[in-house]
Image (cartoon, rainbow, N blue to C red):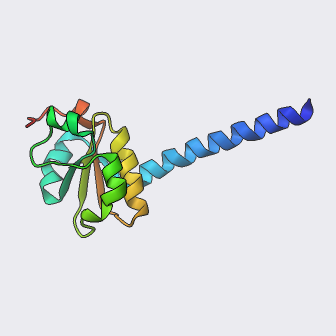
Amino acid sequence: MQTIYWILIILVAFIGFIILLSFFQAKKASVKLNEEEFKNSMRKGQLVDVRPKQEFQSGHINGARNINMQMIMRSFHQLRKDQPIYLYCNTGRKSSKAAIFLRTKGYYELYELDKGLKNWNGPLK
């Protein structure tokens, strides 16, 4: 019985470590900008909406390019490394995942709309 408890303790500790690691990795991958900061700087780089096509078509920030998560993983090389990348989605979860992935591929100027479009009061196209 004691062996099972130790295995469970080790398993829980490992899962906790993975969760903490992903949290700190996400914080390090990009800079989160509030709506005003995002509006003021998004035109200085590549604006990318990582939502699925249907969501993008229902309304997006003017000038945004739709590259969903699957496409980013396959076609990340279409994004320029010499220009900042401004990412957003509905809530910020997908854009954080995209930022983590792009960071591993050598993209360093990554910015996200904090809390995604739900925190956006500007116009949509």
Check the image and report above or below for 28 versus 80.
Answer: above
| Foreground residue among 97 and 27 | 97
Horizontal and vertical percent position of residue 46: 19, 57
In terms of image quadrants, where is residue 84? bottom left
Q: Residue at x 30, y 65 (%)?
A: 77
Q: Residue at x 85, y 33 (%)?
A: 4
Horizontal and vertical percent position of residue 42: 16, 52
Q: Residue at x 35, y 57 (%)?
A: 74
- Please, which residue is most extreme toward the right here? 1
**6 sits to left or right of 85:** right
Horizontal and vertical percent position of residue 91: 32, 34
Q: Residue at x 10, y 35 (%)?
A: 124
Q: Quadrant of the C terminus?
A: top left
In terms of image quadrants, where is residue 55? top left
Horizontal and vertical percent position of residue 1: 92, 29
**44 sits to left or right of 78:** left
**39 sits to left or right of 15:** left
